[in-house]
Amino acid sequence: MPLGLFDSGFGGLTVYRKVREQLPAYDMLYLGDTARTPYGNRSFEAILRFTTEGVEHLFAQGCPLVVIACNTASAKALRTIQQKLLPVKYLDRRVLGIIRPSAEALAQEAPESRVALWATEGTVRSESYALELEKLAPHIRLTQVACPLLVPLVENGELAGAGLEYFLEQYWRETLERAGGVPDALLLACTHYPLLYPAIRRLVPASTKILVQADLVAPALTDYLTRHADFDKRLTRGESERFLTTDQTESFAKLASLFLGRNIVAEQVEL
Ligand code: DGL
């Protein structure tokens, strides 16, 4: 009965890494839909279908609880899965996303704060963060900037250098223009972006706090398990980990080592 993490591909591994650090005893199962990644520019219908298939696969493997460790999939599919799939087919399972805990962290920013977030087009277009923040912290002035080129850059190992800097500068300029000044905080609302943290930190003034999502999601999950002892009890503690991919295992393992900072073995599955 492992804890399941689902992602469109590799980005969720940044969340996996932090959750593993915080909950090392738990058996964990990661599924990356690398055959169909990226989700960032896809339609609502496609993302809902792919995410549902991924979550159901993890359920079939025995996961009582699945975290959708992808902003795009959390934005587009989580609510429908929670409201339409679970009550009908999986009354005893739970699915969590990563937008709510991230929005809760943003909501802690001081009144009158200017907050910016960088994400995929799908996440920005969904307005999920804006809607959550309207409820949680209407005082926050939010600027959302879609950064479609950052995921391909990360996946090609471009974590530093002139090419990357050119695009980061463009996105930062757009952020400054649209926010009307330097934001107080910048949320990296895409699971790939933490790999670009050093380059982003060099570019963004020290007065802007950069929030890395895995640092927000892992404690929120730990807190969830403390508050839901019934689910926590069902998760087994054998310290095992398995990584499933819907495409070639070799390329998954290679890129996964970049995200995790260590080597892993991957298994191929069909959804
Ligand atoms: N993992 C996705 C996210 O956090 C980005 C990659 C994709 O577009 O599939 O939004």
Image: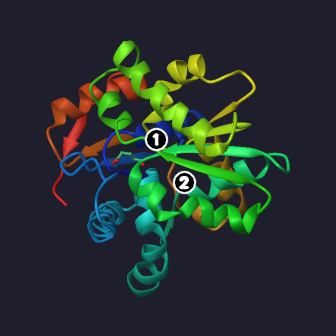
Q: Which residue is mark 1?
A: 191
What residue sits 24% from the left and 37% below the top?
266
Residue ranking furthest to the bottom: 88
Give coordinates of residue 19: x percent, y percent: 55, 40
Quadrant (top left/top right/bottom left/bottom right) for the N terminus? bottom left
Q: Is residue 2 at least partly visible in the picture? A: no
What residue sits 26% from the left and 66% below the top?
46
Look at the numbered discs 1 and 2 and tell me whether their residues touch, using CB distance below 8 Å.
Answer: yes
Quote the CA–CA distance across marks 1 and 2: 10 Å
What residue sits 57% from the left and 33% below the top?
21
Find numbered disc 2 in the image and state the secondary structure of the residue it sits on: loop
Give coordinates of residue 152: x percent, y percent: 29, 34
Amino acid bearing label 1: Thr
Which color scheme is applied?
rainbow
Find numbered disc 1 in the image and state the secondary structure of the residue it sits on: loop
Mark number displayed over residue 79: none
Residue situated in front as seen by the camera: 100 or 235 = 100
Mark number displayed over residue 98: 2
Residue ranking furthest to the top: 161
Side of 55 relative to 253 (left or right)? right
